[in-house]
Protein backbone atom coordinates (compact mmCIF):
# COMPACT_ATOMS: atom_id res chain seq x y z
CA UNK A 1 0.00 0.00 0.00
CA UNK A 2 1.16 3.50 -0.83
CA UNK A 3 1.68 6.34 1.59
CA UNK A 4 -0.30 9.55 1.02
CA UNK A 5 0.76 12.99 2.21
CA UNK A 6 -1.80 15.78 1.97
CA UNK A 7 -0.02 19.11 1.48
CA UNK A 8 -1.97 22.08 2.87
CA UNK A 9 -0.68 25.64 2.25
CA UNK A 10 -1.97 28.07 4.88
CA UNK A 11 -1.78 31.85 5.18
CA UNK A 12 -3.64 33.46 8.10
CA UNK A 13 -6.02 30.49 8.41
CA UNK A 14 -6.38 30.25 12.20
CA UNK A 15 -10.17 30.42 11.95
CA UNK A 16 -10.54 27.29 9.83
CA UNK A 17 -7.31 25.32 10.17
CA UNK A 18 -8.16 23.03 13.08
CA UNK A 19 -11.55 21.98 11.74
CA UNK A 20 -10.11 21.51 8.24
CA UNK A 21 -7.25 19.28 9.42
CA UNK A 22 -9.57 17.21 11.62
CA UNK A 23 -11.76 16.61 8.59
CA UNK A 24 -8.79 15.66 6.39
CA UNK A 25 -7.54 13.23 9.05
CA UNK A 26 -10.94 11.59 9.20
CA UNK A 27 -10.96 11.18 5.41
CA UNK A 28 -7.46 9.70 5.43
CA UNK A 29 -8.46 7.30 8.18
CA UNK A 30 -11.51 6.21 6.21
CA UNK A 31 -9.39 5.36 3.20
CA UNK A 32 -6.74 3.66 5.34
CA UNK A 33 -9.43 1.50 6.97
CA UNK A 34 -10.30 0.15 3.52
CA UNK A 35 -6.68 -1.06 3.19
CA UNK A 36 -6.09 1.34 0.30
CA UNK A 37 -3.46 3.59 1.91
CA UNK A 38 -0.47 2.95 4.14
CA UNK A 39 -1.12 3.58 7.84
CA UNK A 40 1.69 6.16 7.93
CA UNK A 41 -0.19 8.51 5.60
CA UNK A 42 0.01 12.03 7.02
CA UNK A 43 -0.68 15.73 6.53
CA UNK A 44 1.90 18.45 5.94
CA UNK A 45 0.87 22.07 6.57
CA UNK A 46 2.98 24.88 5.12
CA UNK A 47 2.58 28.16 6.99
CA UNK A 48 3.27 30.84 4.36
CA UNK A 49 4.42 33.53 6.78
CA UNK A 50 1.10 33.96 8.58
CA UNK A 51 0.64 36.95 10.89
CA UNK A 52 -2.06 35.36 13.02
CA UNK A 53 -2.01 32.22 15.21
CA UNK A 54 -1.79 29.74 12.33
CA UNK A 55 1.56 28.34 13.47
CA UNK A 56 0.32 27.95 17.05
CA UNK A 57 -2.64 25.99 15.67
CA UNK A 58 -0.23 23.73 13.75
CA UNK A 59 1.78 23.09 16.93
CA UNK A 60 -1.36 22.12 18.82
CA UNK A 61 -2.50 19.86 16.00
CA UNK A 62 0.86 18.09 15.99
CA UNK A 63 0.67 17.51 19.73
CA UNK A 64 -2.77 15.98 19.33
CA UNK A 65 -2.05 14.07 16.09
CA UNK A 66 1.52 12.98 15.43
CA UNK A 67 0.58 12.48 11.77
CA UNK A 68 0.33 16.26 11.34
CA UNK A 69 3.60 17.94 10.36
CA UNK A 70 4.39 21.56 9.64
CA UNK A 71 6.76 23.94 7.87
CA UNK A 72 6.89 27.64 8.70
CA UNK A 73 8.26 30.19 6.24
CA UNK A 74 10.31 33.11 7.55
CA UNK A 75 7.96 35.45 5.65
CA UNK A 76 5.23 35.31 3.04
CA UNK A 77 6.65 33.75 -0.15
CA UNK A 78 3.35 33.13 -1.91
CA UNK A 79 0.90 30.29 -2.42
CA UNK A 80 2.78 28.65 -5.30
CA UNK A 81 6.04 28.52 -3.35
CA UNK A 82 4.20 27.07 -0.35
CA UNK A 83 2.95 24.25 -2.56
CA UNK A 84 6.45 23.63 -3.94
CA UNK A 85 7.93 23.55 -0.43
CA UNK A 86 5.30 21.05 0.69
CA UNK A 87 5.87 18.78 -2.31
CA UNK A 88 9.65 19.03 -1.92
CA UNK A 89 9.36 17.92 1.71
CA UNK A 90 6.70 15.26 1.16
CA UNK A 91 8.29 13.50 -1.82
CA UNK A 92 11.06 12.08 0.40
CA UNK A 93 8.65 9.69 2.11
CA UNK A 94 5.30 9.76 0.30
CA UNK A 95 4.26 7.70 -2.72
CA UNK A 96 1.39 10.01 -3.64
CA UNK A 97 0.72 13.64 -2.71
CA UNK A 98 -2.49 15.65 -2.77
CA UNK A 99 -2.51 19.45 -2.54
CA UNK A 100 -5.56 21.26 -1.19
CA UNK A 101 -6.12 24.72 0.29
CA UNK A 102 -6.76 25.07 4.02
CA UNK A 103 -10.24 26.56 3.59
CA UNK A 104 -11.48 23.26 2.06
CA UNK A 105 -13.60 25.03 -0.53
CA UNK A 106 -12.39 22.23 -2.78
CA UNK A 107 -14.28 19.09 -1.80
CA UNK A 108 -11.97 16.91 0.35
CA UNK A 109 -14.40 13.98 0.13
CA UNK A 110 -13.16 13.57 -3.45
CA UNK A 111 -9.75 12.49 -2.14
CA UNK A 112 -10.90 8.88 -2.05
CA UNK A 113 -11.93 9.10 -5.72
CA UNK A 114 -8.56 10.64 -6.57
CA UNK A 115 -6.71 7.78 -4.90
CA UNK A 116 -8.88 5.26 -6.77
CA UNK A 117 -8.08 6.86 -10.12
CA UNK A 118 -4.39 6.85 -9.22
CA UNK A 119 -4.52 3.15 -8.39
CA UNK A 120 -6.18 2.65 -11.78
CA UNK A 121 -3.08 4.04 -13.48
CA UNK A 122 -3.15 7.86 -13.35
CA UNK A 123 -0.01 9.68 -12.17
CA UNK A 124 -1.90 12.98 -11.99
CA UNK A 125 -5.53 13.42 -10.98
CA UNK A 126 -7.00 16.91 -11.40
CA UNK A 127 -9.81 18.22 -9.23
CA UNK A 128 -12.09 20.07 -11.68
CA UNK A 129 -15.03 22.27 -10.72
CA UNK A 130 -18.22 21.16 -12.44
CA UNK A 131 -19.85 24.58 -12.00
CA UNK A 132 -19.03 28.13 -10.89
CA UNK A 133 -22.38 28.97 -9.29
CA UNK A 134 -20.71 30.27 -6.12
CA UNK A 135 -18.68 32.85 -8.08
CA UNK A 136 -19.81 36.36 -8.89
CA UNK A 137 -20.72 37.12 -12.50
CA UNK A 138 -17.50 39.10 -12.90
CA UNK A 139 -15.24 36.35 -11.57
CA UNK A 140 -17.03 33.63 -13.53
CA UNK A 141 -16.88 35.58 -16.80
CA UNK A 142 -13.25 36.66 -16.43
CA UNK A 143 -12.14 33.15 -15.43
CA UNK A 144 -13.74 31.56 -18.49
CA UNK A 145 -12.31 34.30 -20.69
CA UNK A 146 -8.86 33.75 -19.19
CA UNK A 147 -8.89 30.02 -19.97
CA UNK A 148 -9.96 30.72 -23.55
CA UNK A 149 -7.32 33.41 -23.96
CA UNK A 150 -4.53 31.13 -22.73
CA UNK A 151 -5.80 28.43 -25.08
CA UNK A 152 -5.51 30.87 -27.98
CA UNK A 153 -1.91 31.53 -26.93
CA UNK A 154 -1.16 27.81 -27.07
CA UNK A 155 -1.07 27.19 -23.31
CA UNK A 156 -2.39 23.79 -22.22
CA UNK A 157 -4.50 24.32 -19.11
CA UNK A 158 -7.20 22.22 -17.46
CA UNK A 159 -10.26 24.53 -17.41
CA UNK A 160 -11.77 25.11 -13.96
CA UNK A 161 -8.84 23.40 -12.24
CA UNK A 162 -6.94 25.27 -9.55
CA UNK A 163 -4.43 23.54 -7.24
CA UNK A 164 -6.51 20.63 -5.93
CA UNK A 165 -4.72 17.63 -7.44
CA UNK A 166 -3.06 14.29 -6.80
CA UNK A 167 0.45 13.58 -8.07
CA UNK A 168 2.52 10.41 -7.89
CA UNK A 169 6.10 10.38 -6.64
CA UNK A 170 7.55 10.24 -10.13
CA UNK A 171 5.30 13.09 -11.29
CA UNK A 172 6.40 15.26 -8.36
CA UNK A 173 10.08 14.44 -8.90
CA UNK A 174 9.75 15.44 -12.55
CA UNK A 175 7.86 18.61 -11.64
CA UNK A 176 10.56 19.65 -9.17
CA UNK A 177 13.10 19.57 -12.00
CA UNK A 178 11.45 22.77 -13.27
CA UNK A 179 13.63 25.31 -11.47
CA UNK A 180 12.14 28.63 -12.61
CA UNK A 181 11.16 31.17 -9.93
CA UNK A 182 8.25 32.61 -11.92
CA UNK A 183 6.00 29.63 -11.22
CA UNK A 184 2.47 28.93 -12.40
CA UNK A 185 1.97 25.35 -11.21
CA UNK A 186 -1.38 24.64 -12.85
CA UNK A 187 0.23 25.42 -16.21
CA UNK A 188 3.39 23.37 -15.60
CA UNK A 189 1.78 20.14 -14.39
CA UNK A 190 0.07 19.33 -17.74
CA UNK A 191 3.49 19.68 -19.39
CA UNK A 192 4.75 16.63 -17.48
CA UNK A 193 2.90 14.36 -19.88
CA UNK A 194 2.14 11.54 -17.46
CA UNK A 195 -1.20 9.64 -17.57
CA UNK A 196 -3.87 11.81 -15.99
CA UNK A 197 -7.51 11.72 -14.95
CA UNK A 198 -10.08 14.16 -13.61
CA UNK A 199 -12.47 14.21 -10.66
CA UNK A 200 -15.42 16.61 -10.74
CA UNK A 201 -16.54 18.44 -7.63
CA UNK A 202 -18.62 21.39 -6.51
CA UNK A 203 -16.77 24.24 -4.83
CA UNK A 204 -18.32 25.47 -1.58
CA UNK A 205 -18.14 28.86 0.19
CA UNK A 206 -15.51 29.44 2.88
CA UNK A 207 -16.48 28.31 6.38
CA UNK A 208 -14.90 31.40 7.93
CA UNK A 209 -12.36 34.11 7.23
CA UNK A 210 -11.85 35.90 3.95
CA UNK A 211 -10.36 35.05 0.59
CA UNK A 212 -6.58 35.37 0.33
CA UNK A 213 -6.92 36.23 -3.36
CA UNK A 214 -8.47 39.71 -3.79
CA UNK A 215 -8.80 41.17 -7.27
CA UNK A 216 -5.30 42.68 -7.26
CA UNK A 217 -3.65 39.34 -6.47
CA UNK A 218 -5.85 37.52 -8.96
CA UNK A 219 -4.81 39.88 -11.76
CA UNK A 220 -1.12 39.54 -10.84
CA UNK A 221 -1.47 35.76 -10.71
CA UNK A 222 -3.17 35.70 -14.12
CA UNK A 223 -0.41 37.85 -15.63
CA UNK A 224 2.24 35.54 -14.13
CA UNK A 225 0.48 32.63 -15.79
CA UNK A 226 0.76 34.29 -19.19
CA UNK A 227 4.36 35.47 -18.91
CA UNK A 228 5.68 32.24 -17.34
CA UNK A 229 4.16 29.89 -19.90
CA UNK A 230 4.35 31.69 -23.25
CA UNK A 231 6.19 34.43 -25.15
CA UNK A 232 3.07 35.14 -27.21
CA UNK A 233 2.79 38.78 -25.94
CA UNK A 234 6.26 39.51 -27.34
CA UNK A 235 5.32 37.90 -30.63
CA UNK A 236 2.16 40.01 -30.67
CA UNK A 237 4.32 43.11 -30.34
CA UNK A 238 6.37 41.93 -33.32
CA UNK A 239 3.20 41.47 -35.38
CA UNK A 240 1.88 44.90 -34.37
CA UNK A 241 5.23 46.44 -35.28
CA UNK A 242 5.20 44.79 -38.70
CA UNK A 243 1.62 45.94 -39.33
CA UNK A 244 2.57 49.49 -38.29
CA UNK A 245 5.44 49.47 -40.79
CA UNK A 246 3.11 48.27 -43.55
CA UNK A 247 0.60 50.97 -42.61
CA UNK A 248 3.35 53.62 -42.50
CA UNK A 249 4.57 52.55 -45.94
CA UNK A 250 1.04 52.81 -47.32
CA UNK A 251 0.54 56.22 -45.76
CA UNK A 252 3.86 57.42 -47.21
CA UNK A 253 2.78 56.40 -50.70
CA UNK A 254 -0.60 58.06 -50.18
CA UNK A 255 1.04 61.29 -48.94
CA UNK A 256 3.36 61.50 -51.95
CA UNK A 257 0.45 60.84 -54.33
CA UNK A 258 -1.72 63.51 -52.72
CA UNK A 259 1.17 65.99 -52.84
CA UNK A 260 1.81 65.35 -56.54
CA UNK A 261 -1.88 65.81 -57.28
CA UNK A 262 -1.92 69.12 -55.41
CA UNK A 263 -4.59 67.95 -52.99
CA UNK A 264 -2.61 68.42 -49.80
CA UNK A 265 -4.75 69.51 -46.84
CA UNK A 266 -2.89 71.33 -44.09
CA UNK A 267 -3.72 70.31 -40.53
CA UNK A 268 -2.31 68.77 -37.39
CA UNK A 269 -5.17 66.60 -36.02
CA UNK A 270 -4.31 63.46 -37.93
CA UNK A 271 -0.62 63.92 -37.15
CA UNK A 272 -1.22 64.29 -33.41
CA UNK A 273 -3.55 61.28 -33.30
CA UNK A 274 -0.92 59.19 -35.06
CA UNK A 275 1.80 60.38 -32.73
CA UNK A 276 -0.21 59.63 -29.60
CA UNK A 277 -1.27 56.22 -30.91
CA UNK A 278 2.25 55.17 -31.87
CA UNK A 279 3.68 56.61 -28.65
CA UNK A 280 1.19 54.62 -26.55
CA UNK A 281 1.88 51.46 -28.54
CA UNK A 282 5.61 51.86 -27.99
CA UNK A 283 5.19 52.40 -24.25
CA UNK A 284 2.98 49.29 -23.91
CA UNK A 285 5.46 47.29 -25.97
CA UNK A 286 8.37 48.41 -23.81
CA UNK A 287 6.36 47.54 -20.70
CA UNK A 288 5.66 43.98 -21.87
CA UNK A 289 9.28 43.43 -22.89
CA UNK A 290 10.37 44.92 -19.56
CA UNK A 291 8.23 42.37 -17.71
CA UNK A 292 10.03 39.53 -19.44
CA UNK A 293 13.45 41.09 -18.85
CA UNK A 294 12.61 41.61 -15.18
CA UNK A 295 11.57 37.98 -14.78
CA UNK A 296 14.74 36.84 -16.55
CA UNK A 297 16.78 38.96 -14.10
CA UNK A 298 15.11 37.26 -11.15
CA UNK A 299 15.76 33.85 -12.70
CA UNK A 300 19.50 34.34 -13.25
CA UNK A 301 20.02 35.54 -9.66
CA UNK A 302 19.08 32.04 -8.43
CA UNK A 303 17.64 33.32 -5.18
CA UNK A 304 15.92 30.69 -3.02
CA UNK A 305 12.21 30.29 -3.62
CA UNK A 306 11.51 30.25 0.12
CA UNK A 307 13.17 30.05 3.53
CA UNK A 308 11.97 27.57 6.14
CA UNK A 309 12.16 29.07 9.61
CA UNK A 310 10.69 26.22 11.67
CA UNK A 311 9.74 22.60 11.22
CA UNK A 312 7.40 20.33 13.17
CA UNK A 313 7.50 16.57 12.74
CA UNK A 314 10.33 14.35 11.58
CA UNK A 315 9.80 13.04 8.08
CA UNK A 316 12.31 10.22 8.69
CA UNK A 317 10.44 8.61 11.58
CA UNK A 318 6.91 8.00 10.37
CA UNK A 319 5.79 5.31 12.81
CA UNK A 320 2.27 5.92 14.00
CA UNK A 321 -0.26 3.91 15.97
CA UNK A 322 -3.24 3.47 13.66
CA UNK A 323 -5.68 2.57 16.44
CA UNK A 324 -4.61 5.65 18.40
CA UNK A 325 -4.91 8.02 15.49
CA UNK A 326 -8.35 6.65 14.60
CA UNK A 327 -9.49 7.55 18.10
CA UNK A 328 -7.97 11.01 17.87
CA UNK A 329 -9.58 11.88 14.53
CA UNK A 330 -13.02 10.58 15.43
Image (spheres, helix red, strand yellow):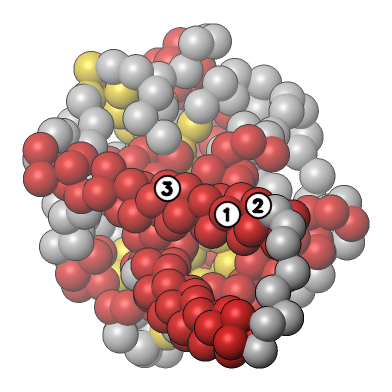
Quadrant (top left/top right/bottom left/bottom right) for the N terminus: bottom left
Instruction: Identify the residue under disc 1.
Output: 275
Residue 20 can be seen, yes or no: no
Helix, strand, or loop for circle 3?
helix
Q: Earlier in the sequence, mark 3 or mark 2?
A: 2
Q: CA distance from mark 1 to mark 2?
A: 5 Å
Q: Where is residue 323 drawn, in percent x and y?
A: 43, 43
| Pointer 1 with pointer 2, Cβ within 8 A | yes
Residue 13 can be seen, yes or no: yes
For this view, does 36 lie left or right of residue 132? left
Q: Nearer the viewer, residue 152 or 305?
A: 152
Q: Where is residue 139 drawn, in percent x and y?
A: 78, 54
For this view, does 125 lie left or right of residue 174? right
Q: Badge 1, how many Cα within 10 Å: few under 14, some, many 20+?
A: few
Q: Which residue is drawn at the image coordinates 35% and 60% (left, top)?
A: 228
Vertical order, 77 against 291 (above or below): above
Instruction: Identify the residue under disc 3.
Output: 287
Q: Earlier in the sequence, mark 3 or mark 1?
A: 1
Q: Where is residue 258 drawn, in percent x and y?
A: 64, 84
Q: Which residue is drawn at the image coordinates 46% and 62% (left, top)?
A: 226
Q: Which residue is drawn at the image coordinates 80% and 61% (left, top)?
A: 140
Q: Badge 3, how many Cα within 10 Å: few under 14, some, many 20+?
A: few
Q: Badge 2, how many Cα within 10 Å: few under 14, some, many 20+?
A: few
Vertical order, 16 against 163 (above or below): above
Q: CA distance from mark 3 to mark 2?
A: 22 Å
Q: CA distance from mark 3 to mark 1?
A: 18 Å
Q: Where is residue 10 drawn, in percent x and y?
A: 49, 31
Dot label at residue 272: 2
Tell me the quarter of the picture where residue 308 sits. Answer: top left
For this view, does 257 lie left or right of residue 209? left
Helix, strand, or loop for circle 2?
helix
Q: Nearer the viewer, residue 148 or 88?
A: 148
Amino acid sequence: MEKLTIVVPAFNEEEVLTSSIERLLAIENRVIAKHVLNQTSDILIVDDGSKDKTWAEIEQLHQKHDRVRGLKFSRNFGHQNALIAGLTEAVHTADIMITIDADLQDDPDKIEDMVAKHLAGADIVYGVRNNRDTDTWFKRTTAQGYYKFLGMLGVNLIPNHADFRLMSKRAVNTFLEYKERNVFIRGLVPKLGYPSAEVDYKRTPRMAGESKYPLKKMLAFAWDGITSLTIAPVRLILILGALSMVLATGMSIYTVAVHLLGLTVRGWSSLMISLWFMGGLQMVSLGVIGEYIGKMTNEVKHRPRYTVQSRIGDRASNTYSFSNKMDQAS
